Every structure is written in C-alpha cells, then in structure tokens.
C-alpha cells in the first residue's frame, strides 16, 4: 500500500519535469514540446486514476 502512494507522487514529479521540458522546448519551434506536454498530461491523468482506485480499494479493505 505504501508503494502505491509513492508511485502516485512520482507521477506528479514526472508531470512537473515534463512541463518544464515542454516549456523550455517551446521556443525552439520543434514538435518535441507537444510530446513533452502530452506526456505531462498523461502523467497527471495517471496520478488521478491511481488515486481514485487506491481510495476505492482502500475503502473496500477497511469495510471488512
């Protein structure tokens, strides 16, 4: 259970890194900025997805 919380926050860390990378590449005029920002959006989505299911299964375990 503790590992899943660590990985949840790792998604946020990666999202911040990808956002920084995307913003720094934005002025170059290449498409790699879009890729970095897309990966950041995916990391944020995965954070909320994992958090939702972690709470769902945590509540299920507590009810027993």
Image: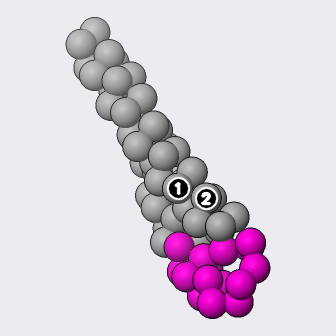
Tag shown at residue 38: 2
Query: Which image quarter holds the C terminus?
Result: top left
The spot of residue 5 in percent (x, y) is: 43, 48
Query: Who's the residue at 66% across and 84% down the image?
Result: 25
Could you tell me if the residues under marks 1 and 2 are in contact, i.e. CB atoms within 8 Å? yes
Q: Mark 1 points at which residue?
A: 41
Question: Which of the two residues, 39 or 58, is positioned nearer the viewer here?
Answer: 39
Color encoding of the figure: one colour
Vertical arrangement, residue 51 with respect to residue 6, above or below: above
The spot of residue 14 in percent (x, y) is: 56, 66
Vertical arrangement, residue 29 with respect to residue 51, above or below: below
Report the span colored magenta: 19-33
Is residue 42 in view? yes
The spot of residue 27 in percent (x, y) is: 63, 90
Question: Which of the two residues, 60 or 16, is positioned nearer the viewer here?
Answer: 16
Secondary structure, mark 2, is: helix
């Amino acid at each position: 259970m503790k590992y899943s919380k660590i990985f949840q926050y790792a998604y946020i860390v990666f999202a911040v890194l990808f956002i920084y990378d995307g913003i720094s590449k934005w002025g170059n005029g290449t498409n790699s900025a879009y890729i970095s920002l897309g990966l950041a959006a995916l990391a944020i989505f995965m954070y909320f997805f994992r958090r939702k299911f972690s709470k769902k299964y945590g509540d299920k375990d507590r009810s027993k």
